[in-house]
Image (cartoon, coloured by chain):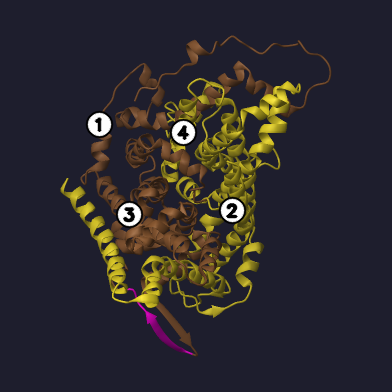
Chain colours: A yellow, B brown
Amino acid sequence: MVELGKTFLQAAIGIGAFLAIILLIYGLTTLLRGRAKERAQIFPFLGFAVIFLIVGLAIPAIRTIITSFYTNKGGTGLNVDTYIGLKNYRQIFADPKTRMTLLNNLWWVILGTGFSVGVGLIVARTADNMKNERLWKTLIFLPTVISMVGAGIIWRFILTKSSDPKHEFGLLNSLTGVFGAKPRAWLLQQQNYLPGLPHVNTSLLIIVFVWIQAGFCTTVLSAAVKGVPDSLGEAGRIDGATEFQVFRKITIPYVMPTIIAVTTTTIIAVLKVFDIVQSMTGGNYNTNVLANEMFDKAIPQNRPGYGSALAVILFVVVVPVVILNLRSQRRARELG
Amino acid sequence: MAISLPLSDSIPLSDAPPRGTERGPEPPLGRRIATFLGTRSGKIGVGLLCILWTIPTVGLFVSSFRPANKILTTGWWTVVRHPQFTLANYRDVWSTTGGTSLGQYFFNTVKITVPATFIPIVIAALAAYALSWMDFKGRDWVFVGVVALMVVPIQMAMVPLLSLINQGAHLTISGHTFTLFVIPGVKGSVVSVWIAHTCFALPLAIFLLKNFVQALPRDLIEAARIDGASHLVIFTRVVLPLAVPALASLAIFQFLWVWNDFLVATVFGPSDLKPLTWKLNDLVGTKGTEWQRLTAGAFISMIVPLGVFFSLQRYFVRGLTAGAVKG
């Protein structure tokens, strides 16, 4: 209890100090008069935001772009010293390991997004006509609020292989054991069951992501499906449209902006996925993804130049999706 | 918490869709799926899917209360036949004597999360007010800049921001290095995590709050102005009370985001103030087979988010549909 008290005291001091600074600056502006006061008062309101955004985001982002053309020959942590042009980028695309990483990212985007939005749409549409709708949607949504590291532990527990084959306690190995299959260390499985599909271990990581993300998709899509005016469907039915035609020709077009917004939000989340991979495989066994590799290279391995180049690649891929997302969110809001 | 499953009485299990009543060409797959979903078996299927979705969490929850020797030899589902529960795992991971002292990390997470939720939202609310109700040149351009920064992923700003916080800003011109500024007392303290979270939260927070604050009735704010109210009074007495729904939704999402965050705390957190998520990931590496500890530890990290979710559910839907999700 003492510990809890100290914790909150420390948090309160931080918050209090911050509020005091703002009020102090505001207090100073009230000493001025007329237009000068009007102008000065912009600062306590907007100043912090602008400083944080420029110093904390805009300049660092530009510095990351510059850093990506450098390397640290001296090897001093975060600082780079030697200009090497596009060499970091060439190395990224030449290294078969990194190419594997990029390919994994592609699978994450296709399968992770596809299944999350697919499950979301199916549950949103069906639960709408089910009893206890809220209960069902709550069950799906639950994983969304827990941390990805926590989710990683939950799924490692499902996929775990016991050191004693007589006593399997992992859910998946116990299930496959019922059918007579040998227990496996699932996260080490680098083969693919069907040619062209991602490795078994990467697919399992994607399943963890879908497990987390589907609840988000369901909730947002469900709100949109409910927003479709009943009169539209009724009018269609009177004109002799089947239930499926109503769904495809009225519901889907009506919620299309929301589907795009959900899809793009999910793609952005997929591209930045880091915690799941870090806590489940650490990016080993060919399961690496861009965001994890960027972290590994820049921080533990002390290669900020190479890490920055990976960050820039991530940025270039994310930008068009974010722009699409902002547009579709605006449209979804206008309609909803 | 008791959850009653309505499967037994409301949805008869035997009601399969009528087969073979229609002849002719096979309907397309999408149509068959849609038709199936409309039937009772479709609903049962979705119900089962929802239950399936809960099984991983239930397994973790049940396991965290089982004795260590049971967890490591039998599946958690066997508790149905041999129920045996204990709180020993929680005592073990929470205390300093168990070698994990998650209690300490739990408080670290609180120390990080509360200010890292509060500060960005206050800054964003102030900025939203300025961008909506204060007149100055270039106002629209500031907002365009905010929206533009929404595209910057954390990874893009992470490393330079870290070096800025730890080393200050320096400028090197032809071999001479000038120190522009050093932020005193921030390196190695929890403040660096607060700053990092604030930077990464601001674009979306300002964007959402500005949209909300701008839509407040103009008459109200004009009336307050004519009465001679200052900006601070209008902001605290008129705008903030009206913006409570938006602020609440945003606060919940920021709170959860910071509580569950792993990346920012790992990169920016000083070594003696790492959060729960960091410790859990560390445990996976060092005690990856001690499931009695991992299950209890993971559940400790989930209690607060689950509590927030169940008590504030309606704000969730509102926030999600307003786009309050950081991708």
Q: Are marks 2 and 1 on the same chain?
A: no
* Residue bearing mark 2: A326
Residue B87: give its label.
1
Q: Which residues are magenta?
A: B175-183
Describe the element under mark 2 as helix, strand or loop. Answer: helix
Crowdedness near tag 1: few (<14), some (14–19) or many (≥20) residues, C-alpha within 10 Å: few
Q: Secondary structure at mark 3?
A: helix
Q: CA distance from mark 2 to mark 3?
A: 31 Å
Q: Give the prevailing secondary structure in the magenta stretch.
A: strand
Mark yes or no: residue B266 visible: no
Percent x, y for residue B310?
Answer: 37, 34
Q: Quick one: which residue is furthest to the right in this view?
A: B24
Amino acid bearing label 1: Leu
Q: Is residue B178 magenta?
A: yes
Residue B307 can be seen in this image: yes
Query: Circle 4 marks a residue in which chain?
Result: A
Image quarter (top left, top right, bottom left or bottom right) of the C terminus of chain A: top right
Between discs 4 and 2, the one toward the N terminus: 4
Crowd tier of the residue under label 4, counting other residues whose Cα lies within 10 Å: few below 14, some 14–19, many 20 or above: many
Please give the residue where the numbered disc 4 appears in the rendered image.
A158
Q: Position of residue A123 (x, y in %)?
A: 57, 29
> At numbered mark 4, what does the secondary structure look like: helix, strand or loop?
helix
Which subunit holds the residue at mark 1? Answer: B
Q: Are marks 4 and 1 on the same chain?
A: no
Q: Residue at x 25, y 31 (%)?
A: B87
Which image quarter is the N terminus of chain A in? top left
Task: Tell me the kind of residue under disc 3.
Answer: Arg
Residue indicated by mark 3: B237
Local secondary structure at mark 1:
loop
Q: Position of residue B7 (x, y in %)?
A: 49, 15
Question: Which image quadrant is residue A35 in?
Answer: bottom left
